[in-house]
Image: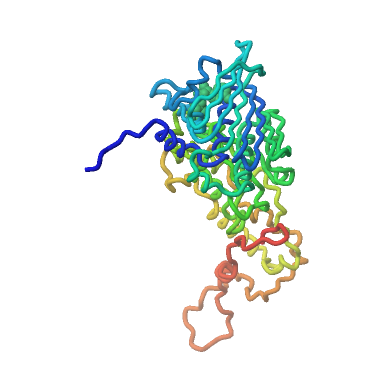
Amino acid sequence: MPQINILPKHIAELIAAGEVVERPASIVKEIMENAIDAGADKITLEIKRGGITYIRITDNGCGIDRENIRRAFISHATSKISTADDLNAICTLGFRGEALASIAAVSRVEVMTRTEQESVGTRYCIEGGEETVIDDAGCPKGTTLVVRDLFYNTPARMKFLKKDVSEGNAVASVVDRIALSHPEVSVRFIRDSKDVLFTSGDGKLDSAIYKVLGKDFASTLIPCDYELEGVRVSGYISKPFNARPNRMMQYFFLNDRFIKTRTGMVALEEAYKNSIMVGKFPACVLKIQIAPGAVDVNVHPAKTEVRFANEKMIFNAVYYCAKSALQQGDTRVQASFSQKVARQFMPPPTEGKQIRIYEQQLEKIKEETKPKQDFWTNTTSAEFKKEAEKPKPIVFNDNSKFEIEKNDEPNLIPCFKPTVQEPVPASETKPEPVVTAPIAEPEPVQPIAEEIQPELEPYRVIGEAFKTYI
Ligand SMILES: Nc1ncnc2c1ncn2[C@@H]1O[C@H](COP(=O)(O)OP(=O)(O)OP(=O)(O)O)[C@@H](O)[C@H]1O
Ligand SMILES: [Mg+2]
């Protein structure tokens, strides 16, 4: 049996740091989240060389007082929770007390911070987990944290970093998510001395989207806001004809935290079924708000994956939110059939009865394609029957504008030759009881429905051309 060693503190810290600090983007995420938890409404981030050599984050939050500055860099030291029960309802972005300790273990960190109550601030330096300086500093209220030379003491980790540009792009994605999740915070991002993002912090999600994702993207969105069973989903979703080639533009936030949620993604895409082409994906910036006790965020080191107490609730809330927004805000170019195209579908002009049959068929198609109320379990449980009334009625979108203009009847010439004969009154169609020789009697007339029905196929969206579904 080999000897079991208790690892020295600095090695244990390096191992633990690996969980939290994977690349510059992880550092930026942790420090920006700390700033938000500290109540900041202005955050400035500057990076150089993709954040590998230099990251500086300044906030105007509550600051850290001299007494607590050392503690902030000790593992499992946090001001955000204190009991096991607190873990059941986390209301802050951080809660583990791991981030600063992990960052300091693998880089050179310098902090300048001051609280409102202090007249003099503190400058604190820590390198590879070892304190080097603690001193007075003249600084405004809030915290500035500078992280230099990431992985200077762990060359093995350094090797796994990508090129500066890729690391810088990863940082930019993190900044985008933070800016979108907290529109009330003004975020400024300077990358290699260039200002690349500056959000107003006016608290409006649409202004944040405009700044972060651009004017063109913002103009393709439909607002949505929906509440179901204590889950509120709000934000923006893309119009169906602005579908994207991938899921990169699907942003989900849970209680103002960016998350990856398969449930949300599937629910969103289900809502777009039959509205967008196969292989295309909707975009969204959706905020899900639920009671903190209904979700466990303590699942993944990066805190981006969460476990919901009831996934079905989340699914249904996202689904109905998107579906009702699509119904109200879908401004797609609707299929308006030219006479030439319409002729192919139209019944012969003389057959008023056929029009009724056609309309009945269309109703049937609409009925069949109506999504079932409970998409999660595909059941109609009592609970969901009750809820069925809540969502707004779902209209079969794609053909909703396709109506038969009965007034146009005389002008429409069918492109197929009608083989249907006029129905004959029932009395005339009664077969003769005895027939000895073939008589030139008319054949019993088939009911029109039987002849026409096989000709008419249910309409389905088969493609998209010039932003029109056909
Ligand atoms: N910018 C800041 N302003 C004020 N206090 C801060 C700031 N950054 C960190 N702190 C304090 O330092 C403590 C430790 O921060 P750290 O990020 O390590 O842990 P955490 O945020 O509590 O949890 P997590 O590891 O999940 O991020 C925080 O709990 C907070 O009290
Ligand atoms: Mg933190």
The image quadrant where one finds the N terminus is top left
User: Residue 291 or 312: which is nearer the viewer?
Assistant: 291
At 51% from the left edge and 17% from the top edge, which residue is drawn? 68
Q: Provide residue 178's location: percent of width, then percent of height.
A: 61, 35
Q: Provide residue 39's location: percent of width, then percent of height.
A: 60, 22
At 39% from the left edge and 23% from the top edge, which residue is drawn? 85
* Residue 115 visible, this angle: yes
* Residue 230 visible, this angle: no
User: Residue 265 or 451: which is nearer the viewer?
Assistant: 265
Quarter-wise, where is residue 13 in the image?
top left
Quarter-wise, where is residue 172 in the image?
top right
Q: Provide residue 114's location: percent of width, then percent of height.
A: 61, 17
At 62% from the left edge and 25% from the top edge, which residue is drawn? 144
Q: Provide residue 316's location: percent of width, then percent of height.
A: 50, 41
The answer to whether 21 is drawn above or below residue 73 in the figure is below
The image quadrant where one finds the C terminus is bottom right
